[in-house]
Image (cartoon, rainbow, N blue to C red):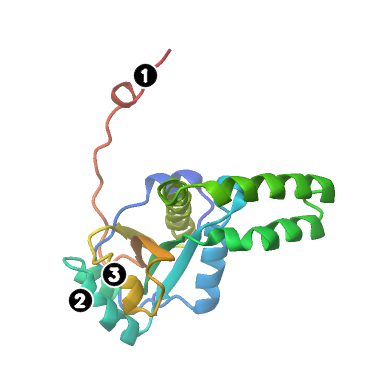
């Protein structure tokens, strides 16, 4: 089985990342290491620390067979990757407010009076937030976690590819999830590249930036 090399080199992690389409099928990622990768990805920031991202790790042959028909023109990634991580956003993530803020107090991250004040304000805000506004917030936050996941994977020695071309309206139900609560963000294939990904051009800073 191919060994992977971890890295703490920021430039290698950032500039060495490529979107990989084909993986070495002999390389497997243990669930213990995948748990570590997801825990590190979950250090991404989120609005009021509500952490709306949810991960469905599809690493079994049965799971991949179920995913493949939904993956459209991304079959190779599904069949050869060590796993495909389906990233969702939890539209009922406010259910975890008490747990998150109570645990912050317990761990000494926040005093009780600040927690009480913030929690009361956040609940009031989220209780009147429209579904479209909530979706916008959760989409941004889950995107941050998705990008962090790809960089963490690179640090662990793996390659990834974010995938937007799949049957988003069918994936939750295909894996017995509530499609109204868990709304899809992207698929991320992960494994060791069978061949190196292609470099790509980036617009210059002068094109994408305005100074005032």
What residue occupies the far top of the structure in this picture? 212
Assess disc 1: are there few (<14), some (14-19) or many (≥20) residues with their C-alpha within 10 Å of its C-alpha. few
What residue occupies the far left of the structure in this picture? 73
Callout 2 secondary element: helix
Callout 3 secondary element: loop
Above or below for 28 versus 187: below
For the N terminus, give its image quadrant. bottom left
Disc number for residue 69 = 2
Tell me which numbered mark, 2 or 3, is placed earlier along the sequence: 3
Q: Nearer the viewer, residue 99 or 128?
A: 128
Q: Looking at the picture, how far across and down is residue 8, in whole percent?
A: 54, 52
Q: Nearer the viewer, residue 86 or 147?
A: 86
Disc number for residue 210 = 1
Above or below for 67 versus 209: below
Residue occupying the point 41% across, 15% down: 211
Q: Looking at the picture, how far across and down is residue 126, in whole percent?
A: 57, 49
Assess disc 3: are there few (<14), some (14-19) or many (≥20) residues with their C-alpha within 10 Å of its C-alpha. many
Circles 2 and 3, Cβ within 8 Å, touching? The answer is no
Q: Does 25 sit left or right of 144 as displayed?
A: left
Callout 1 secondary element: loop
């Amino acid at each position: 089985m191919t060994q992977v090399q971890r890295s703490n080199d920021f430039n290698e992690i950032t500039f060495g990342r490529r979107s990989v389409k084909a993986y070495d099928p002999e390389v497997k990622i243990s669930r213990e290491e995948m748990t570590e990768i997801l825990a590190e990805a979950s250090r991404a920031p989120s609005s009021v620390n509500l952490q709306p991202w949810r991960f469905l790790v599809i690493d079994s042959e049965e799971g991949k067979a179920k995913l493949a028909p939904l993956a459209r023109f991304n079959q190779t990634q599904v069949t050869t990757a060590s796993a495909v991580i389906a990233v969702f956003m939890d539209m009922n993530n406010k259910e975890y407010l008490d747990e998150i803020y109570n645990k912050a107090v317990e761990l000494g991250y926040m005093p009780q009076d600040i927690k009480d004040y913030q929690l009361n304000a956040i609940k009031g805000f989220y209780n009147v937030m429209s579904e479209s506004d909530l979706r916008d917030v959760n989409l941004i936050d889950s995107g941050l976690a998705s990008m962090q996941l790809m960089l963490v994977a690179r640090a662990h020695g793996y390659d990834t590819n974010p995938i937007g071309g799949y049957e988003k309206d069918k994936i939750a139900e295909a894996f017995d999830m509530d499609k109204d609560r868990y709304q899809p963000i992207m698929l991320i294939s992960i494994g060791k590249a069978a061949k190196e990904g292609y470099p790509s051009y980036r617009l210059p800073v002068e094109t994408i930036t305005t100074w005032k």
